[in-house]
Image: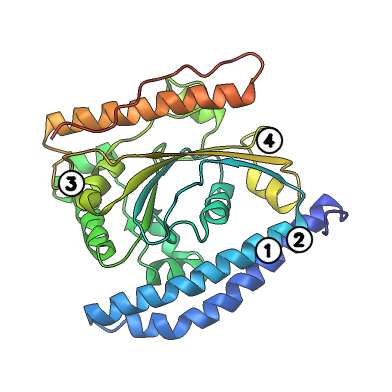
Amino acid sequence: MLSFLPSPLLGLFTAALICLNTAFWFSLFLPFMLLKLLPIKALQTFCARGLIPLAESWVRCNSLILHLTQQTRWDVQGLENLDPKASYLVISNHRSWTDIFVLQHIFQGRIPFLKFFLKKELIWVPLLGLAWWALDFPFMQRYSRAFLEKHPHLRGKDMETTQKYCARYKHYPVSVINFLEGSRFTPAKQKARQSVYQHLLNPKAGGVALTLSSLGDYLQQVLDVTILYPQNRPKNIFWCLLSGKIPEVVVRVRALPVPAGVMDRDYLNDETFRSEIQNWVNSLWQHKDAQIEALLNPAESEAPAIAHQAGLKA
């Protein structure tokens, strides 16, 4: 354990180790990445699948680095009966970039390698951007409502991108993660967006609706994840992780059935489907908000038993 180092030095040392680990595994990615450039679908699928064991080894090494440099207490519940050969939709709240490390750490070896939706600009992140591309992570171009009003021909592009990637995921087990808040939580964002929740931003149902309509019949379960850093403020949590200043990570996982009757539904034009998905998402968020309150104030708050809608009408 290297936690005896001063926090700034520990943070720099941990960051350096993670960068070196990333560079090493990226070098092993290169042959697969070059082959994936060839316009042969079978070869591209082979390369994407061939990279997954390397990516999983990268995650294990990152976990080892954090184990050697941190004294974080992990309070994790709900990982029983998961299957690395099944496909999952993972839904989570979003507190920090640290969430990615947390999710990769707790799920490694338990479910297929996590793939998450990324802003298109992130493809330019050194090393990682190309690795995400090679691993078939979906890169999404997000447009504002005002921009779409001026350029209506771009409506539905996110749907096309989601469907394209989900079609690839039907060839092998996969875990697709959606951060429904669309952004990391801060009190300022909570106020600006007029969130109706005490500990969360309002969820956005469009992304998860597109995933379910494209991949619903191929998923075994939905994993509803709640991540909390009880002794840390939302600001600078990632630096706190690197510098050994996250004393506790709390994670709760609920395995839920995949909503019924979602395949090939049109979220943009089907008002019934849109309402059903929004109600389903809101019920998840009501439970999650109450759960976070109970975790933060166990002596003062009892999480209400909120009925969860197990599926949607066909």
Asked if 37 appears above or below 275 in the picture, the reply is below
Mark 2 and mark 1 in contact? Answer it, CB < 8 Å: yes
- Determine whether label 3 and label 1 are within 8 Å by CB: no
Foreground: 309 or 229? 309
What's the residue at 46%, 28% (across, down)?
288
Q: Disc 4 on helix, strand or loop?
A: loop
Marks 4 and 3, the one that precedes in the sequence: 3
Which marked residue is nearer to the observer: mark 4 or mark 3? 4
Residue 111 x %, y %: 44, 57
Residue 48 lies, in percent from the top left, at 36, 73
Residue 42, percent from left and from top: 24, 79
Which numbered tag is attached to residue 68? 2
Query: Helix, strand, or loop for circle 1?
Result: helix
Label 2 secondary element: helix
In the picture, measured across the screen, residue 295 lies left or right of residue 271, that is right
Residue at image location 70% in from the left, 63% down from the top: 65
From the image, state whether disc 3 or disc 2 is nearer to you: 2
Give the side of residue 8 with respect to residue 287, left or right. right
Q: Is residue 220 left or right of residue 26?
A: left
User: In the image, which disc is placed on residue 64?
Assistant: 1
Residue occupied by mark 4? 232
